[in-house]
Amino acid sequence: MNHSLLRRMWSSRMLYLMLLPGLAFYAVYKYGPMFGAVIAFKDFNIGLGVWDSPWADPWYSHFLYFYESPYFTKLLSNTLLISLYKLLWGIPPGILFAILLNEIRLLAFKRVVQTITYLPHFLSWVIVYGMLLVLLSERTGLVNVWLKENFDATVPFLTSIDWFRTVLVGSEIWKEFGWNAIIYLAAIAAIDPSLYEAARSDGAGRLRLIWHVTLPGMRSVIILLLIIRLGNILEAGFDQIFIMYNVQVYPVADILDTFVFRTGLEQFNFSLASAIGLFKSLIGLVLVVWANRVARRWGDGIW
């Protein structure tokens, strides 16, 4: 380190001091706990602690146990299916809503609509599930009361394996599409206005402006968010599913995260739970690298 660099750092010492709390937070709460992942390769004993617990024999025994267990295929397929449904059905509403908001010229109406659609994002899944019970409960839900009165039939939306994923994905879309639109609106705001003027001078209408200017201007943000979502493809939404699922829908609702919860905190098998967590992280890392390489071919990669 040369003297000029040291002098520059000393001249900005107050900025570096302000940086220290943030670095300490990440060191203690983000990077420090990562060393605990070593228990995935040990037969962890809570009485002996992380470092004194014996190593597993072979070191990959917990990964092998999970792979050979009868739950592996079902858990992985449920997790991937729910994540893919959320990915495929969850991204387009945010894009479409941002474009529609951008086309609204009445500013007061636009702000009211934005505020109303943002609000569900701040609701906890407990509250959302309470609302779903009021609407979809088979005995007292408003929808089923109406179906009973008009068609003498009810639908077990919350306890049927045929309906559970639909309700799961639908409630996620309703809760988040307004919030997701914020990022797309920011991308639209960054588009050069001269592109719209040039397109209008060529006779482009609103639909052509959206197709040839707005959507291409949003492309890099859409790809960025897609890469991030792919990295979390095995994160199907623990909070939501843990609150909404029940024994009747286990075949289609039980995912890796809920299995980790039962294995780690209810059965105290921390090594197996940690091994499943590492497996998820590895798959996510591979998918992010792959998606970024594909995106770079279009010139929109993250790195």
Image (tube, helix red, strand yellow):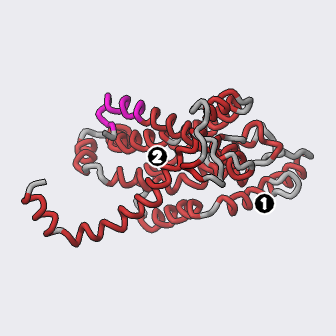
Name the secondary structure under disc 2: helix
* Magenta highlight range: 289-301
Identify the residue position indicated by label 2 in the image. Answer: 95
Q: Main secondary structure of the magenta part?
A: helix
Residue 69 occupies quadrant: top right
Answer left or right for 135 relative to 64: right
Coordinates of residue 105 in the picture (x, y in percent): 40, 59
Judge whether residue 86 can be spotted in this image.
Answer: no
Taking the spot 7% from the left edge, 59% from the top edge, the residue there is: 4
Amino acid type shown at disc 2: Ile
Q: Going from the N terminus, do you reach mark 2 or mark 1 first?
A: 2
Residue 207, given in percent of the width and then of the height, sits at: 40, 41
Residue 29 versus residue 150: which sits nearer the camera?
29
Q: Is residue 129 visible?
A: yes
Considering the image in quadrants, where does the N terminus appear? bottom left
Would you call the spot at circle 2 few (<14 residues within 10 Å), some (14-19), or many (20 or more)?
Answer: many
**x and y percent of residue 37 in the render?**
53, 46
Mark 1, residue position: 134
Could you tell me which residue is drawn at 42 percent across and 33 percent down?
291
Work out whether residue 171 or residue 270 is closer to the camera in this orientation and state it: 270
**Amino acid type, callout 1:** Val
Q: Quadrant of the C terminus?
A: top left
Residue at (66, 58) in percent of width and height:
125
